[in-house]
Image (spheres, rainbow, N blue to C red):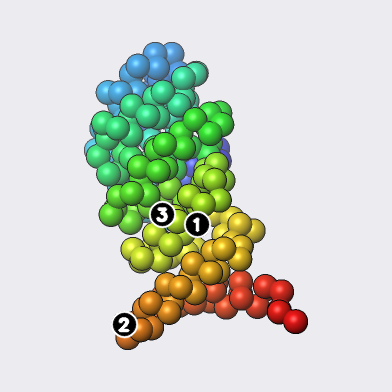
Amino acid sequence: MTPDSLRAALRGVPDPEWLDAALHRVAAEPTAINRLFPVVGRRCGRGALPDAPGWTADDAARVLLLTALPGEHAAYADTLYQHGDAAERRAVLRALPLLPIGAEAVPLLHDAIRTNDTRLVAAALGPYARHLDPAAWRQAVLKCVFSGVPLAAVADLESRADGELAAMLAALAAERHAAGRELPADATDLLDRLTAALPREA
């Protein structure tokens, strides 16, 4: 999603005037985001956006507030994440790929992946996860399998999945099979695809 598409999807929020004013305020007075960010849910609602599948109104509005900042995006993202509730943290994570911050916010991904909140884990594995190194990314994919996060939430899964991830999934599958359990269907499908793509031994 882009800021423009999120803005279009938010046309039907309960208080569009408040959101317009908040975006202008943040652009002119960046510190105002610290006061505005927590009240977004009350002013814009928390319902799903029909024109932005997978997004809620509060998620989208908070992302727009972060993109409206004139600078210091990484610093504000860190502050809002560290002091936010789960919904605010998820919005920060979803905003990261839209901010001009390079890899500065990777520590936020590591924090989110360590939690047991599946919404944060899923948000952390979005497009910004391209900045995770391969080992950390593979561990994060396994965390999704362990915690029940659908692998459809993992950005760039098909292009980044490799033989090492296949070996890790195969070990997990064997462990679960020994315990009378199976991998989730999407993880089994991924393992099958990766295994089929590996070169066969002579």
Q: Nearer the viewer, residue 34 or 14?
A: 34
Q: Which of marks 1 and 3 is nearer the N terminus?
A: 3
Type of amino acid at the residue the image marks with label 1:
Arg
* Residue marked by disc 1: 138
Quadrant of residue 41 in the image?
top left
Q: Give the alpha-carbon distance from disc 2 to disc 1, as whole Å.
A: 23 Å
Q: Which of 3 and 82 is in front in this view?
A: 82
Q: Nearer the viewer, residue 90 or 117?
A: 117
* Residue marked by disc 3: 122
Instruction: Answer with left or right where residue 46 lies relative to residue 164.
Output: left
Instruction: Answer with left or right where residue 38 lies relative to residue 91.
Output: left
Density class for disc 1 (Cα within 10 Å; few <14, some 14-19, many ≥20) is many
Q: Is residue 43 visible?
A: no
- Indicate which label's residue lies in the foreground, 1 or 3: 1
Type of amino acid at the residue the image marks with label 2:
Ala
Quadrant of residue 45 in the image?
top left
Q: Which residue is drawn at 41% across and 23% down?
A: 75
- The residue most toward the front is 202
Residue 119, compared with residue 3, is above or below; it is below
* Residue marked by disc 2: 179
Q: Residue at x 40, y 17 (%)?
A: 30
Q: Which residue is drawn at 27% across and 23% down?
A: 35
Q: How many marks?
A: 3
Type of amino acid at the residue the image marks with label 3:
Ala
Density class for disc 3 (Cα within 10 Å; few <14, some 14-19, many ≥20) is many
Q: Please provide percent x and percent y for residue 131.
A: 55, 41
Q: Which of marks 3 and 2 is nearer the N terminus?
A: 3
Q: Which residue is drawn at 43% across and 47% down?
A: 124
Q: Which of marks 2 and 1 is nearer the N terminus?
A: 1
| Quadrant the C terminus occupies | bottom right
Density class for disc 2 (Cα within 10 Å; few <14, some 14-19, many ≥20) is few
Residue 51, compared with residue 33, is above or below; it is below
